[in-house]
Amino acid sequence: MEIKLVAYGIAREIIGHSEMKMKVVDKITIGEFKKSIVGQYPEFGRLRDLRFAINEDYQNDDFVLTTNDEVVVIPPVSGG
Amino acid sequence: MLYSYLTENKTKCGYSLDYKLNIIYICLIMSLSLSEKIRYSRHLNLPQFGLDTQEKLKNSKVLVVGTGGLGAPLLQYLTAVGVGTIGVVDFDTIDESNLQRQVLFGTSDIGTEKTSAAIKRLQGLNPHVKFIEHNLRFDSSNALSIIANYDVVADGTDNFPTRYLVNDACLFGGKTNVFASIFQFEGQVSVFNYFDGKEFGPNYRDLYPSPPPPGMVPSCAEGGVLGVLPGIIGSLQALEVIKVLTGIGTPLSGKLFIFDALDFSTRKLNVRKDPQNPISGSNPTIDHLVDYDEFCGVKDLHFSEKYISVEELSEWKKQGVKMQLIDVREPHEHEAANLGGVLIPSKSVELHLDQIPKVGKVVFYCRSGARSAKAIKLLKEKYGYTNLINLDGGILAWKEKFDQAMRVV
């Protein structure tokens, strides 16, 4: 199935895109999806404990993705 | 003096102050003077606002932590709209590089203290506001006693340790934390630990349980920031402070707002409370303010001028670059997994100076990069070492990059 990854901040820099369609296995969980991103982009692994939002709602790592889900990744920023 | 002030301002209780001066100690709610009514007339005409709401602002106390890019619009709007008491926290002086976004200050302020320059400007903006200057570094030793005097805290700081500190202090102190943060062309806003009458809303640790590795997310100084961005985000932060104080509208509690200036996109995401939150979760493990520099592992970056990434170290190893690796963790940690090199636990480096060369490349590492940075700082300051290099992110970074099976304890 296909999902859309939306990345902000440092995550955008690592992936190289602000939005990206990705093919993933059916019924993949957020936790498994995170591992697959780290596999593709090892630097992403340094953003430990980063939470993902699915279609505007933050979800836990055991949440199961469905096709066309929008997965939003917003790393913390500290500037003021 | 007090008498004339009080008779001028009157109190809401309806007693004549000429005869019942003692009642002033009970009636702390101050109403507006004629001058204030004229000043705030556009508020008073506003549906859903009016006199009562303006008086709520006048009787409110807000602490603004940080007088930088966010603090500039935040402080100016809170002052202009008539918040009664505003505390201003900063320890810094004004640098020329601040002026591109910190519109509270002018060229003639360069070199002066931020808090006093800010208050001088703000007092000119609105003489009815009382300012309290906190010209100090907001830290674990003073945070709780400072915030205790305020109703709401607005976090406009510029680093992760202070952000976690403000969050935790607000949790322990039962205060709402109106949060905003910026990075290059992006801004985030939320309202943390907001009490809706039944329960407290999510907080920063629900959203970001742990800080990013030190140095990974650049600050404004390192990564840059578009001058107008904090103006936009700090104004939104002021809006949320006003809403929390007055009760108008719906505050941004349980939501994270994000703005991307480059493509003018906005999002509002729903944040959940995390049962594992170490302070506000179901089994709290932290009951006091901690050392936030250590928690965020930033000491290494402040103290260590020289550091390399695990990728660079890997290249050095491959190329056979001549260097001495020194592991400053404890023996059990070294035994579980190491990158080679000599084991000298950080606490005992001073006893093993003979094993630490003063020339050539010497790379210190530990678990995350914090202890090794401390050791380097000590050796540099006390023994004059200039050749010590810190491994950024420590062995954890190495594990994540090159060897996921590594047993790091």
Image: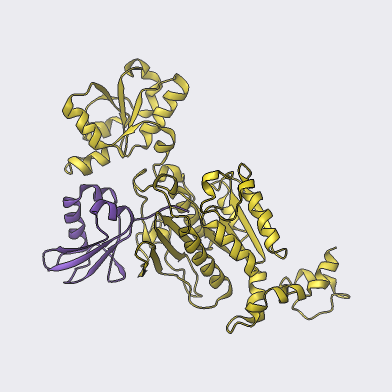
Chain colours: A purple, B yellow
Q: Which residue extends farthest bottom? A: B47
Residue nearer the viewer, A55 or A22: A22
**x, y percent for residue B302:** 44, 37
Relative side of B52 to A64, left or right? right
**x, y percent for residue B88:** 61, 54
Q: Is residue B39 visible?
A: yes
The residue shown at (68%, 54%) is: B120
The residue shown at (85%, 63%) is: B1
Q: Is residue B283 visible?
A: no
Residue B3 vs B155, above or below: the answer is below
Residue B19 vs B98, above or below: the answer is below
Residue nearer the viewer, A2 or B9: A2
Q: Which residue extends farthest top? A: B354
Residue A69 vs B229, above or below: the answer is below
Residue B224 vs B248, above or below: the answer is above
Place residue B389 in its image quadrant: top left
The residue shown at (54%, 78%) is: B248
Q: Which residue extends farthest right? A: B19
Quadrant position of the C terminus of chain B in the picture: top left
